Image (tube, grey):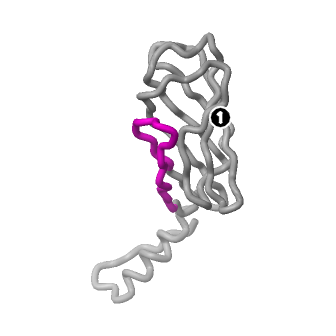
């Protein structure tokens, strides 16, 4: 990367600086998607995506509470709008004091709405508050 020296009094200093900065590398763009809790769940979930060059990194994280989970059952707990990450693959949902992990999956309906679902084995669930972490890279 060639860097041009800027000297005192140089009239085109701003365009020279912008040209040099444009060579630094990939730009990063951030998008936040709203997460709506469903089926009586309370909590706080966020979904953020970062575009780095031609790649995306998306993370859903937060916590859920207020509802008992029937062990060994697939349950919807949130939705996100069309265009939100829908191929989450490194997914964890777990009680605060447990090291065993449940699973998060997604489905997309005909309108494009992304539905987040959880499956927690019976041996895992031990209380009403669950931590959530899901990752997507593409």
Residue 126: % across, % down = 50, 13
How many marks overall?
1
The residue shown at (48%, 49%) is 35
Q: Secondary structure at mark 1?
A: strand
Is residue 46 highlighted in magenta? yes
Q: Horizontally, is 68 left or right of 118 in the view?
A: left
Determine whether 77 is above or below 121 in the image. Answer: below
Task: Give the vertical position of 91 relative to 21 (above or below).
Answer: above
Numbered range of the magenta stretch: 29-47
Figure check: 133 above or below 85: above
Please give the name of the residue rendered at 62% of the width and 37% of the height, measured from the top-left corner. Answer: 117
* Residue 86 position in % (x across, y down): 66, 50
Q: Is residue 76 above or below residue 25?
A: above
- Residue neighbourhood size for the residue with mark 1, other residues' Cα within 10 Å, grouped as few (<14), some (14–19), many (≥20): some
Residue indicated by mark 1: 90
Q: Is residue 17 left or right of residue 71?
A: left
State the residue lying farthest toward the left: 9
Residue 120 forms part of the magenta stretch: no
- The extreme bottom residue here reads 11
Q: Nearer the viewer, residue 88 or 124?
A: 124
Please tell me whether the stretch drawn in magenta is mainly helix, strand or loop.
strand
Q: Position of residue 68 (x, y in %)?
A: 50, 23
Q: Nearer the viewer, residue 92 or 24?
A: 92
Which residue, as the protein is rendered here, is positioned at the far top?
123
Q: Front-most of 77 and 40?
A: 40
Pick the front one: 116 or 90: 116
Q: Quadrant of the N terminus?
A: bottom right
The quadrant where residue 51 appears: bottom right
Residue at the location (38% across, 76% down)?
Answer: 6
Identity of the residue drawn at 46% across and 13% down: 97
Residue 63 in the image, given as x and y percentages of width and height: 44, 32
Q: In terms of image quadrants, where is residue 113?
A: bottom right
């Amino acid at each position: 990367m060639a860097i041009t020296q800027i000297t005192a009094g140089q009239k085109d200093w701003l365009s020279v600086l912008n040209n040099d900065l444009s060579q630094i590398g990939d730009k990063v763009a951030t998008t936040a998607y709203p997460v709506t809790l469903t089926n009586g769940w309370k909590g706080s979930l966020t979904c953020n995506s970062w575009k780095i060059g031609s790649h995306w990194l998306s993370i859903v994280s937060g916590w859920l509470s207020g509802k008992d989970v029937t062990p060994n059952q697939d349950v919807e707990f949130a939705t996100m709008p069309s265009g939100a990450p829908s191929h989450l693959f490194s997914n964890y949902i777990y009680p605060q004091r447990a090291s065993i992990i449940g699973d998060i999956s997604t489905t997309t309906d005909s309108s494009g709405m992304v539905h987040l679902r959880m499956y927690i084995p019976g041996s895992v669930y031990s209380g009403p508050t669950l931590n959530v972490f899901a990752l997507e890279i593409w």
